[in-house]
Amino acid sequence: MQSERIIQPRRKMALDFDKLRAGSTAKQTDPRKIFTTLKRDARFKRPLDEQSDVLDAWYARKNSKDITIKMNTGGGKTVVGLLCLQSSLNENLKPAVYITPDNFLVAQVIEEASALGIAATDNEKDPDFLSGRSIFVANVHKLINGRSVFGVGEKKIPIGAIVIDDAHACLNVVNEQFCIKAKSGSKVYESLLSFFEEDLKFQSPAGLLDLKADEPSSVMSVPYWSWQAHQDEVIALLHSEKNSKELEWTWPLLSESIPLCTCVFGGGRLEIAPHFVPIDRIPAFSSAQRRIYMTATLADDTILVSHFQANAAEIEKPIRPKGGGDIGDRMILAPQEINPNYTDVEIRQLISEISKSLNVVVIVPSKQRTDFWKTAASQILDKDNIQEGVGFLRAGHVGLTVLINKYDGVDLPGAACEMLVIDGLPETNGLLERLEMIYLDGTKRQLVRQVQRIEQGMGRGVRSSDDHCVVLLLGARLTQRLHQPEADAMFSSATRAQIALGKDVASQVRGKSIKELESILNLCLTQNDEWVEAGRNAIVNAPPITDANLDKSQVKLREAFDAARIHRYDVAAERAQDAVNGTADPQLKGYLKQQLAEYINFRNPAMAQELQLSALGINSRLLKPIAGATYNKLNAPTVGQAAAAVRFNERFLEANDLVIWINGLLDDLDWGEEGSKRFEAAVSELGKFLGFGSQRPEDEVGRGPDNLWALGGLKYLVIECKSGAVLADKISKADTNQLNGSMIWFTEKYDNSCSATPLMVHPKTVFEYAASPHADLRIINGLGLKRLRDAVRAYSVSLATSGRFKEQREVEIQLQHHNLSANSIVALCSVAQWTK
């Protein structure tokens, strides 16, 4: 009998992998070497050249507390950020945190980490995160809020290394968290308005009336001397409401900084916020050993200092990949620069036709502007439905999509967006930002913020170096701003190269029809070989930018703010004085002087008032000191209307510049609730453009009309602008009384040799029963405003077409021909009261 063979089960050989990993590579800190050790998805063959450039540069400087990494959209920033954090964990700097602007991007980062082979979690209580074995990924709101899981005023969860991804997109959230807001009718709003009503009335009686009427465009700041004097009452009020919905999330962050805050009323709401963010209220962030800021577009690096208290010396040299090859192909054009006679309707029709076969995305600054696109739009997206709408774009053809005020945080790769339209200038979101824009209107500081958001928007449609997108910049005001000589230098190097290429295209097709423009756009849309080669050469040959764009005055003011927080007002004044001394622009210098006076007021109120008066002397839009502002009488130009108009035209280098500028002006000179301040500013500029003397007394000294024109021969126009009264049935008693009061003001300031015509800009010509209009009052109604706009446009086009806009005789002839001379302009655009 054959015996059976018994097979023994095979024993598994146990290996001690800890011993195997205990060699020199167990705690590798070089991020590029870490990459090779990861069990990663097949798509990660090796780091891209751009990623390698950045990782090597970061590793050489990794011990700096603050580092900025700038990579173009699609350059692989997420992988870089994850590898930098893994390197830090391997060096035992833990825990590690990766911050994104929103939850949508949190999911993307965790997915990318998983594919890369790096452990990541979205749970701050995960033991692997706390022990340094995984990276915590969260949106910025999770880090910065009044109940932060990391601790407010104390450190609940420490941070060893942190990445702030899309740093520019995170800034809005940071601003929101360090700003107390309340609406009219709330206890906070009504109590503070009662506290400061007399102070606001002193600044501007008419402005206070607008506040009380909840005018959308109204904005007024409580004078800092009054704010400081009432700190006990203010803090007691806010403390009593700390658990209310207005303060529950912000009070813990701002409770120690209230004396250094600015309080602004406007449009039926208020905002209270400091000049700079006291980010150390989140100690875990402020004490983190490594803080890495990643961004694709950051025209103004100063905001890293103002918002995150970054060390200016360390972020002055941002890390960038070599060259600009990590950005996709973009044809960037401003159609109204090609031909200023293109109408918005013509351009919309062209874009609508293209959207029938391709996905087109239009970014508009406000909900109001969506009305223009409704007939062509397949979907309109705001913060509530944007994720779903973006999903549709990525899934297939949608057509034309409108995004409302969303310039960052949206990825639209490939066919999701082959044409991107930036329609109009980005608008300010908050009252404090709007106030600063009023103070700094027309300055480089204002322009750089607008350029920042425009470049953010332009980055939505190109998400990799293989991607392509046509970018159209629409709107007269947007074209006007980007036409300013200093605007070009504010863009990133690659974007600047693409804009320059677009301008070369524009110069070759200038004046062509809208139909011919379509064939130019198709060069990019169809990826024409010659166009692609030209685009790549432009980027590769773009001059590199090595230094950060730092506003030295803001850096000094940040130091002043930090000193004032510990009651070192002497140091604060010194730093603020340094900022003033280092500034040449008069308008900005005045604004900085006001901030200097604010710090001095804590110790020496009398000196602060003297300084405030000095600040007002060079920037008339600032706060009026207790002693009031001195009014300087307006005179017509002594050289005469035509010669003065020619002097104004000297600013235009060529005829196209003139037409672009006037198109922007006329954009503002239109009806609408939101744009009434822009309307007043446009009236002022129009007066100067036509060769008249022009002032804004109510804006400059807090008394008098919205606008005053000196026509010559001691004749004046006293103008009240009610461009926002689009829903009014009749001219109200309050508006009538305001113009009557302005006429009384005129007779007080000017002697009997001067005469004035009261002029009201209002869509209606019939008054309320209780109104008592001035006997000589005339009205620029809807038809009158159209006549004025048409005449100004025709006058400008005539001068531009002839090229003789700097010749006095030609200007005089055209002023007369278009009824824009001092003798005929009132009859051209206004009607008598009660006219039907």
Image (cartoon, rainbow, N blue to C red):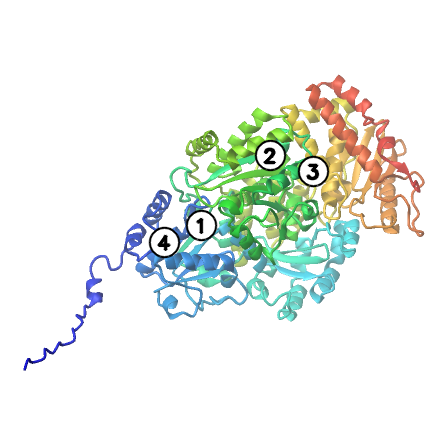
Nearest the viewer among 624 and 486 is 486
Q: Earlier in the sequence, mark 2 or mark 4?
A: 4
- Marks 2 and 3, Cα distance to the nearest angstrom? 15 Å
Tell me residue 598's x, y (percent): 62, 51
Nearest the viewer among 403 and 657 is 403
Tell me residue 133's x, y (percent): 34, 65
Q: Is residue 651 visible?
A: no
Residue ID for mark 3: 345
Nearer to us: label 2 or label 3 = 3
> Of the residues shown, which amino acid type is indicated by label 1?
Met
Q: Earlier in the sequence, mark 1 or mark 2?
A: 1
Q: Is residue 588 visible?
A: yes
**Image quadrant of residue 185?**
bottom right
Secondary structure category for the residue under label 2 = loop
Q: Earlier in the sequence, mark 1 or mark 4?
A: 4
Secondary structure category for the residue under label 3 = helix
The reply to whether callout 2 and callout 3 are in contact (CB within 8 Å) is no
Tell me residue 605's x, y (percent): 65, 52
